[in-house]
Each structure stands twice: as structure tokens, then as C-alpha cells.
Amino acid sequence: MDIRIPSEKDKIQVKKLWEYCFDDSPEFVEWFFENRYKSQYALASYDKDNIRSALQLLPYKIMIRNRQVDTSYLVGMSTWPQYRGRGDAAALIRQSLKIMHERQEWVSILLPFRYDFYRKYGWEICYEHLTYRGNNELFTGPGRISGDIIPVSSDNIDILDKCYHEFMQDYNGYVIRREDDWKRILGDLYVDHGTGYIVFDGAKATGYVLFTIANRELRIRELIHNAPEAKDILLKVVASHYSQSDAIIWNAPADDITYVDMHDSRGLMYKQTYVMGRIVDVRRALNGLKTQKDFELYLKVIDDVLPWNDGVFYLKSVNGMVEVTPSDGFPQSTVSINTLAQLLWGYIGPSQAKKHGKLECSDDKVMDILNEIFSITVPYIIEDY
């Protein structure tokens, strides 16, 4: 088995493997490999010139605790059946982590086909959605549709981007979108025959919604609102498509409380785990985190995959930020690389981790330090590749 970055001529092989392994429409596959795929972001295992297994590392910037961080979104992990169980996937994943480290990407994200498969390589659940599923009447609410509403088009990218970033300020781990990201999002939407609307309050755009309708189901891809009225209006706009859909599905942020005002939301909402995160380099991922306390802490991290993460780190506050260096000191707290990712993303807090046996801690003073560094946040990401 030989692992390398595919040549441009091998794009056809990667595409055929994708088509075999994933249940995507031909239109999407064509669009993806024409607009999103780049050989330099792919990795494959070979038997001579034949690809056995492949994945892609799509570059993004995400916001982690008020810091812009480069990352790779691992997608398209696929193996031909005759090569499964031979270690190709494991070898590709380990090599992809080395490549991310070389590219100075200190964290990674992925949406898994199975959580337990990636968990053994150090990724852990760091995002979730509050998923609503109900008929159109569930989302109508009192009153009529009001406000100035226009259809979404590629000419509106600046408006969409402003709404998006204003909304995301309250969340952690979100993608910092660029123009190319918006072109991808809208291109993907149009491939699936989707549409969207922007709502205005006077001259100011206060939100937008992007959605698709297929098989009598309306799926909200994004619902961004920077005023309560905007959310209500956009949900009414979506629900007004009652002649084309029997059900509406919306993956809202985990802190959404739209259900409070619904006439009866019982049985129509549930928590849905989503994207996983991984720390590729502990020292650099934690270095520079903000803190308001003076402290010193010896933290032991267990990482069975990446040797540079496996060991004790000395954390110290310097001018309001965390400074991290490797150390031989005696650990005051011990945590796995999986749980440390959840703490960094703010998906869980140190007290939760300790309560459930995922973090060891010597005393309450150390817990206070950990709670200061790793306060609970609300991670939210919309992208699924």
C-alpha cells in the first residue's frame, strides 16, 4: 500500500469511488468535483496505480474561543469493498493528521458515518443541533407575514455574509465564511433546486433562510436571524409552502427556544449530535486562550495516536492569555485528547467531564482553573462538508 496525494488524472478514480460509497445525486457529484474538489486537498492509498481508498481535507477557518483557526474538514473517507479491513482507512487518517500538522492546522473537524470509528483516532462529538420536525402548522404562529422580503441570489452575498457573522457572534466553532464559501453554499443549494429569502427591517437585513423541498419534505439548511421578528417572519415564509411539503425539518442551534412559543412541540424536537472535533496540536491549540485569572497548571493529555500530544503540559497565565509548554512536572489533572477537544470547543465543561469520569483532577483549586479556561459555550456549525 502506497499513500500519496492523487495526481490530477486520478480525479476520475476518486470520483468513481465517491459515487460508489455515497448516496449523492449525480448532479451534486458533478458539481462537487467540478467546483469543490482539488487534488492538493486529497489523499489516497494505492495498489500500484489503482486507488484503494481516499479522503479529502477541505480547508476552512473556524472561530474557536474568539480566535481564528485554520482547520481541515475531513470528508469523503471511502474504500473499495475488496480493500476494506486491510488498514487503508487507518493509514490514511494517520497520514492526514501529519499533513494537517505540517500545514499548521492545530484542530480538525469531520462529520462521521460512525462516531465510534473516528473516536478511536482522537475525534469526539463537539457540535449538536436541536432538530425540529413537524407539519407546516407547527411553524406558523400568530399573525401574518410582514416586512420586506426578497429572494436570495448570488448578488446578495454581502448581505448574507453580514447577517451570518452577526448571528454567529454568540457561538463557538463556526466557519468564518469567505466569498468562495458563499458561492459553494449557494451553488450546492441550486443543485438541489433550493431557494431562499432575505427579510429586511427598513434598509437593514435582519435575517435569511435557505431551504430545499424534495419528497414532500422541506429542509431548512440555514435560518439566520438577528431580531426575534425576523425568525418569526422567515418561519412563516417557510410554512407558507404548505402545498409543496407535508413536513418541515430544521436543525437549529442547541440553545434555540423556538419550541417555547409553539402551540405543542411535544414529540416534534430532539437533540441531534453532529460534527466531531480533534486537537491536532495541544500546545498550539491551547496557547493564547484568554483568561482573567493568574494560575499555573500541569495538565496531562493522553493521545495514543499523535506522540507530540501525549504527555504533560505546563499552562500558565501571561498577560491575560494562556501560555503552554511541554513539561516533566507532576500532573494536577489528566484528560484524554477526545475530552480535551470537547472542553476546547465548549461542548462540555470540566465539571461535567469530571462528574462522568472523563477528567481527573487533584483538588477544587485546579477545577476552578479548568473552569476558567474551558467555560461552556454553544458550538454551532452548519457546514456538513
Image (spheres, grey):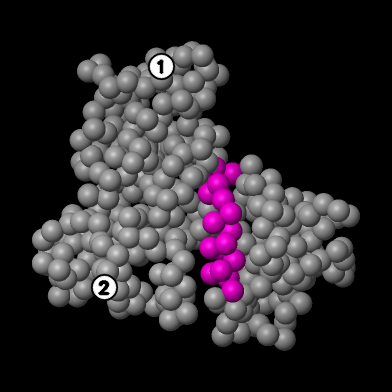
In the image: residue 153, left or right of residue 384: right
In the image: residue 161, left or right of residue 261: left
Which x, y percent locates residue 255?
62, 50
Crowding around mark 2 (Cα neighbors within 10 Å: few <14, some 14 to 19, many 20+) is some
- Front in this rendered view, residue 343 or 86: 86
Looking at the rendering, in which quadrant would you find the N terminus? bottom left
Looking at the rendering, in which quadrant would you find the C terminus? bottom left
Q: Which residue is under mark 1?
A: 316
What's the distance in space between the residues labelled 1 and 2, CA to CA? 49 Å
User: Which region shows up in magenta?
Assistant: 170-190
In the image: residue 186, left or right of residue 122: right
| Disc sitting over residue 13 in the figure | 2
At x 39%, y 49%, the residue is 72
Which x, y percent locates residue 204?
82, 52
Q: Amino acid at mark 2?
A: Gln
In the image: residue 67, left or right of residue 297: right
- Front in this rendered view, residue 373 or 207: 207
Compared with 12, 115 (above or below) is: above
Q: Mark 1 or mark 2: which comes first in sequence?
A: 2
Judged from the image, the secondary structure of the residue bearing numbered disc 2 is helix
Give the quadrant of residue 41: bottom left
Q: Is 173 a magenta residue? A: yes
Q: Amino acid at mark 1?
A: Lys
At x 51%, y 58%, the residue is 383
